[in-house]
Amino acid sequence: MSTTATAKKDSRVLKINGRQICSRCIYDESVPAISFDENGVCNYCHMVDGLIAEYKTGMPEGEQKIQEIIAKIKADGKGKQYDCIIGVSGGTDSSYMVYWAIQNGLRPLAVHYDNTWNTAIATENIRKVLGKLNVPLFTHVVNNKEADDIFRSFFLADVPEIEASTDLALAETMYRAASKFGVKYVLEGHSFIAEGISPLGKNYFDGKYIQSIHKKFGKLPMKTYPLMTFSKFIKWTTLKRIQKIRPLWYIQYSKEEAKAFLEKEFGWQYYGGHHLENRMTAFNHSYYFPTKFHVDYRNNSLAASVRSGQMSREEAIDEYYNKPPYLEDELLAYFKKRLCFSDAEFDTIMQRPPKYWFEFPTYKKRFELLRPFFYLLMKSNLVPRSFYMKYCFPVKQ
């Protein structure tokens, strides 16, 4: 979205490049499933307000609730080597989450899924933070050729979820580590205040989706990739009853303050932008999404920064509409070389019409049919609220 933004304002709405923009954040009409109230405020802002009210985020009641959860984690973890699992990427939120856990007297095991595309900065960040805090690391390293075959499959399929295999594999790896060490709690470093709510609609993934894409376009068998099937998901949530907790949903949290603290305390380094600590993720957010699908997910964090008062709306609008995403030098060349695409093949694929998840087999209908069941799991913290909201309701295409 490097085109210069032109704003038009009347008595009711602000329009940018012909699209209505939320009067509170920077989401516009291109965001899937968006709607506006009579004051021009989008449904995603109302969704965030609802979560703040429910979790009492940053309020004394929220702090009290998370302290009650901490006490339960400690009690259930008594006599065990670890009392919680924390997924780490080398990014801001997960690094701070480890520090927060130690400060609150927890005994975490850090877990990392290595898709073999990590930046050196991310790897060093993990080492620095865990080393100083004396937190052990459990890592699952997938075979790099196998991981690349899955990434290549998604690129050939013309779908946006090229990073789906990483996200699902990390979740599966954390569940496996929790089961191995008898841990009942997984702490996730997600903050809807700092990151916003991902728009509902065109992006989706599950184990069956990954299998179906790979079966059609892949060449190598999945041997080392930790695929989460539906039966495994039910095993972890229902039989093992491993809970997922998001402490940052309860406490006062600023990503910018967390960055400054991590830099000072651990020599942690920033990696240039939201989700850019991994080179595949950087390709996805900086080039693939904006170029092929005309979607720039910087609006998630920028809109969140406006809602939380970390950035003015004018600054966020200028950043999002007038400045292109940061693209690392040689990243495209690295992607092509590693996944064995010629320049011509790469350009042909990028110019083909997009396809989406609903054109392939998934578990989505099953999740929708089992909505009452997953509602009970959500109320017991066995699945995140975001899973229930995104996976268990029909989505307009």
Image (cartoon, rainbow, N blue to C red):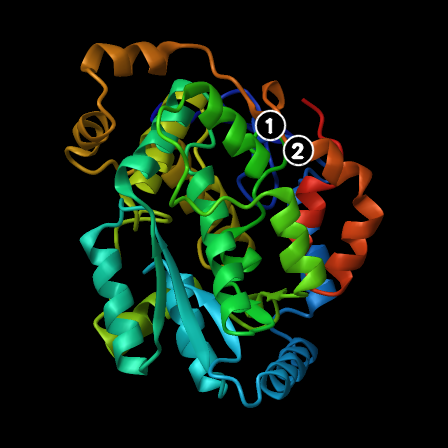
* In contact (CB < 8 Å): disc 1 and disc 2: yes
Determine whether 294 is above or below 371 in the image.
above
The residue sitting at 56% across, 26% down in the picture is: 30
Front residue of this view, candidates 132 and 240: 240
Image quarter where the C terminus lies is: top right
Question: In which image quadrant can residue 324 be found?
Answer: top left
In the image: residue 184, left or right of residue 39: left
Mark 1 — residue? 29
Front residue of this view, candidates 353 and 259: 353
Residue 86's x, y, as percent?
46, 68
Residue 31's x, y, as percent?
58, 31
Question: In which image quadrant can residue 255 be found?
Answer: bottom left
In the image: residue 256, left or right of residue 295: left
Front residue of this view, candidates 14 and 205: 205
Determine whether 206 is above or below 112 in the image.
above
Q: Is residue 244 visible?
A: yes
Mark 2 — residue? 34
Image quarter where the N terminus lies is: top left
N-term mark: 1 or 2 = 1
Cα distance, mark 1 to mark 2? 7 Å
Residue 158's x, y, as percent?
44, 19
The kind of residue on which mark 2 rests is Ile
Residue 184's x, y, as percent?
60, 72
Density class for disc 1 (Cα within 10 Å; few <14, some 14-19, many ≥20) is some
The kind of residue on which mark 1 rests is Glu
The residue sitting at 47% across, 24% down in the picture is: 215
The residue sitting at 19% across, 54% down in the picture is: 120
Front residue of this view, candidates 175 and 288: 175
Density class for disc 2 (Cα within 10 Å; few <14, some 14-19, many ≥20) is some
